[in-house]
Image: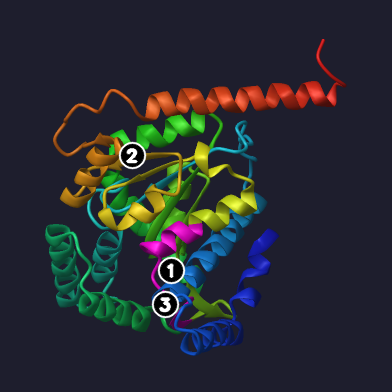
Amino acid sequence: MAGRFGEFPARWGRGAIGQSLQEQLARISRSPFGPSEEEVRANVAGEASADAALALHDAELATAEAQPEAPRDLTAAAFFDVDNTMVQGASIVHFARGLAARKYFKSADLVDMAWKQVKFRVTGKENSTDMASGKEKALAFIAGRSTAELAALGEEIYDEIIADKIWPGTRALAQMHLDAGQQVWLVTATPVELAQVIAKRLGLTGALGTVAESVDGKFTGRLVGDILHGLGKAHAVRTLAIREGLNLKRCTAYSDSHNDVPMLTLVGTAVAINPDSDLREVAKNRGWEIRDFRTGRKAARVGVPTALVLGAAGGAVAAVISRRREGGGTR
């Protein structure tokens, strides 16, 4: 495939990943004042996610029959969490349902995965044992399979299950940003290949997701860094912003989870969508807009529409200034 996609496997090949992590972890052991192992893995995951997102985006553009309209507001973007923000429930569980129906694994595994998601939603906290177990099973499933197979399965299962799970209110917010000429990215712990399918189906710019290592088009059964969540999401957004020339103060982020506070505090405008109790409290304390599509509650009076108007105005002013400079000054 064209664009950055061709560079992705080489940049995050087996040797490069192992060497990068080993070197950074070795530095941690020598210096007690450096970043923790969790932070190193989150940073590696975030950078790999940005690489993969841009690679897949370029590949889509290279194979598209009609080129989409280029963003008119080049320095602003919106970042949407997926599970319970854009999609009702957990996208990985929906995907697992489709795989179980195709006899890829046992229904008992699906029940176990669903139960862990329920516990997470109720407590609002990630259980390290559950995460390790889920990661191990997921990696065991994809090991040796082709990346193309996973993407194809993702498209089938999206059409069968996930399409009906999209929150209309959140989809409308994403469309508002697109209509304002801004990039719109999904940011999720779901594998980047599946996240890209959701983004493509919704007409969004692309997706930042968890990157599984692949060699010669087949998954090795290892992750690049770690699952994309918490600090990893924030690093992925920051990395993408640098590479795309985005001004994070003019960007907007949406999430339902307190775990995404690092990403939400990174941008100029944060919006809590269907928030868990901890995020709702944080949003109230910080004056963030809250939108709850589960109950039909009215949105706060300030928030996205205002941010979009100001963002669009800022982009228009920048464009006018640019044109005047190109024309040799004002008239």
Looking at the image, the residue that sits furthest to the right is 328
Residue 70 appears at what percent x and percent y? 64, 36
Looking at the image, the residue that sits furthest to the top is 331
Residue 271: which numbered mark, if any? 2
- Sequence-wise, the earlier of marks 2 and 1 is 1
Left or right, 229 with respect to 62, comes to left
Q: Nearer the viewer, mark 2 or mark 1?
A: 2
- Sequence-wise, the earlier of marks 1 and 3 is 3
Q: Which residue lies under the disc numbered 3?
A: 36
Distance from the alpha carbon under mark 2 to that under mark 3: 29 Å
Residue 278 appears at what percent x and percent y? 19, 51
For the residues labelled 2 and 3, say whether their Cβ atoms are less than 8 Å apart: no
Decide: is 44 above or below 313.
below
Residue 102 appears at what percent x and percent y? 28, 70
- Which amino acid type corresponds to the residue marked 2 in the rendered image? Val
Residue 55: which numbered mark, if any? none
- Which amino acid type corresponds to the residue marked 1 in the rendered image? Leu
Distance from the alpha carbon under mark 2 to that under mark 1: 32 Å
Is residue 308 among the parts visible in the rendering?
A: yes
Is residue 1 among the parts visible in the rendering?
A: no
